[in-house]
């Protein structure tokens, strides 16, 4: 199974947190820690206990030099689940990326945050070589099944597209 949400990858890229309440307690956790994979618990998709409820989503204020993009590929063009989606949020100084969040949807049982690829972006400018490097790092541990290996190629294409859109946003704002 793959996680079908459009909203979750985008919110994770924005560093969203969720408030979970129960009759006796409340807690605030990063949204990326909310989802469970079958390796952790094959019977649950999230951390909510039987007496808990997600009551609030908090999105921190983004820096003035923040740029974000969400792209999804789907079979039909209206109200379809993503075959693959990419949420990319970066903070820049000049043209250099100071912080990055890269989250893939439609490729794993929970939104997949590509932290190694994020680290590769930090301190660098976006260019073709960097785009290729980020794609390879983001998907280096992917293990597609026999009928969905096309998702690796599609994810790389969407990551490149997201980087291009971010770069065009940075250039356009300077311009």
Image: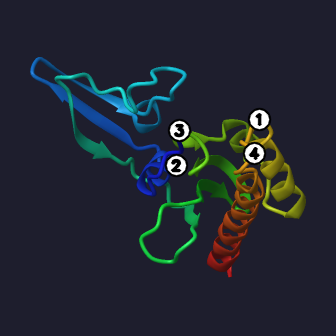
Task: Tell me the residue that label 4 is attached to.
Answer: 146
Disc 3 to disc 2, how far (Cα)?
A: 17 Å
User: Looking at the image, do the residues carrying marks 3 and 2 touch, with CB atoms under 8 Å apart?
Assistant: no
Disc 4 to disc 1, how far (Cα)?
A: 16 Å
Pick whichever of labels 2 and 4 is earlier in the sequence. Answer: 2
Secondary structure found at label 4? loop
Secondary structure found at label 1? loop
Numbered disc in front, either 1 or 2 = 1
Measuring from the top left, give residue 48's x and y in whole percent: 29, 27
Q: Counting other residues with Cα less than 10 Å from the Cα at mark 3, is it few (<14), some (14-19), or many (20 or more)?
A: some
Which residue is most to the bottom? Answer: 175
Task: Tell me the residue that label 3 is attached to.
Answer: 109
Task: Tell me the residue that label 2 is attached to.
Answer: 13
Pick whichever of labels 1 and 2 is earlier in the sequence. Answer: 2
Numbered disc in front, either 3 or 4 = 4
10 above or below 18? below
82 above or below 108? below
Pick whichever of labels 3 and 1 is earlier in the sequence. Answer: 3
Secondary structure found at label 2? helix
Which residue is most to the right? Answer: 129
Which of 99/18 is in front? 18
Task: Tell me the residue that label 1 is attached to.
Answer: 141
Which of 160/170 is in front? 160
102 above or below 160? above
């Amino acid at each position: 199974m793959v996680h079908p949400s459009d909203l979750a990858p985008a919110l994770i890229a924005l560093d969203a947190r969720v408030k979970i309440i129960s009759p006796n307690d409340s807690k605030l956790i990063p949204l990326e820690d909310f989802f469970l994979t079958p390796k952790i618990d094959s019977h649950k998709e999230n951390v909510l206990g039987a007496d808990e409820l997600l009551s609030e989503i908090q999105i921190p204020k983004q820096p003035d030099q923040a740029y974000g993009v969400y792209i999804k590929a789907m079979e039909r063009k209206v109200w379809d689940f993503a075959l693959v989606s990419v949420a990319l949020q970066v903070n820049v100084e000049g043209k250099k990326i100071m912080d990055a969040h890269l989250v893939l949807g439609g490729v794993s049982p929970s939104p997949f945050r590509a932290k190694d690829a994020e680290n590769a972006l930090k301190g660098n400018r976006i260019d073709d070589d960097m785009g290729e490097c980020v794609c390879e790092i983001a998907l280096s541990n992917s293990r597609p099944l026999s009928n969905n290996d096309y998702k690796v190629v599609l994810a790389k294409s969407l990551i490149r597209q997201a980087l291009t859109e971010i770069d065009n946003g940075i250039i356009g704002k300077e311009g």
